[in-house]
Image (spheres, rainbow, N blue to C red):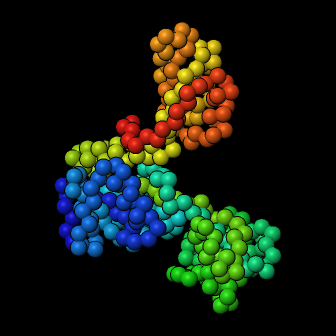
Amino acid sequence: MTLDNARLHLAVQKSGRLSQDTRDLLRGAGFRIQEGKNSLAARIENFPLDLMLVRDDDIPTFVADGVCEFGVVGRNVLEEASLEESAPPVEVVAPLGFGRCALRIAAPESTLYDGPRSLGGARIATSYPRLLQRFLDTNGIEATIVKMSGAVELAPRLQIAGFICDLVSTGATLEANGLRPVDTVLESEALLIRTGKTLSPEKAELAGRMMSRIEGVLATQESKYIMLNAPEEALETIAAMLPGAEAPTILPLAGRPGHYAVHAVCKESVFWETLQKLKGAGASAILVVPIEKMMM
């Protein structure tokens, strides 16, 4: 496979939990993905960008080596790779807000656990030996790490290990295997990463345009546009209550002296409790609407 040097390349998970969310993010940023027969790549029709469809643990290497200028990868995969002595660095551009999970220590229901010291001398099965070793070293614990490439949750049942260290999202898999989470090694989510190699001026310009679109989508994930009416004496109090808002737009209401319309972009979630507090402070006709796109 020969890469087009006139286009950007984004390494993404070929299949798995981050694959669809990454595609949804790109579509939200206006990129039209051409799903062809090529199982190794997908072309963006309306932007000089190609998606390279690879294994998640290969993504840090692709990006570090400059084969792909950008990549989307879980923090767990990135940090496991970065702990290898010869691993070249990559730049974390932004957390993406999806693929949230945790790398956790889990034990059989009948096993007592009283903090990391309970792991002393134990056998722990994991697909993340470097992250687990870092956790053990940080806590001054000596234990035997049993490296497994899959089905880690079966290790206690098969008497391969007394504990496991594995990714947990809902916890359903642990429960189905008679395990419970007892400690957290790492909180993870999807990250957008960038190569540390210098880009050509042409690619740097494309990268800026691509990032502008993606940042616009990320900025709207929690953001809401809120509109309300308020008397002049309540404006300062109400402005301070708007979650994550900067300077709101304040306009006089026609035919209502001393009353104003307040418009603001709230960069945090707007809950019912917030609306009740705003109303209690004197706000009325409160309207909260989602933001589809926002250019920063």
Give residue 80's position: percent from left, percent from top. 52, 67
Give residue 127's position: percent from left, percent from top. 55, 76
Tell me which residue sits at (55%, 30%) in the image: 286
Q: Which residue is situated farthest in the top direction here? A: 257
Q: Which residue is situated farthest in the bottom direction here? A: 158
In the picture, measured across the screen, residue 288 lies left or right of residue 192, that is: right
Give residue 53's position: percent from left, percent from top. 33, 69
Q: Is residue 212 above or below residue 262?
A: below
Tell me which residue sits at (60%, 16%) in the image: 231
- Can residue 261 be seen in the rendering of this structure? yes
Quadrant holding the C terminus: top left
* Residue 51, image quadrant: bottom left
Quadrant holding the N terminus: bottom left
* Residue 220, image quadrant: top left
Numbered circles on residues, count: 0
Tell me which residue sits at (66%, 64%) in the image: 184
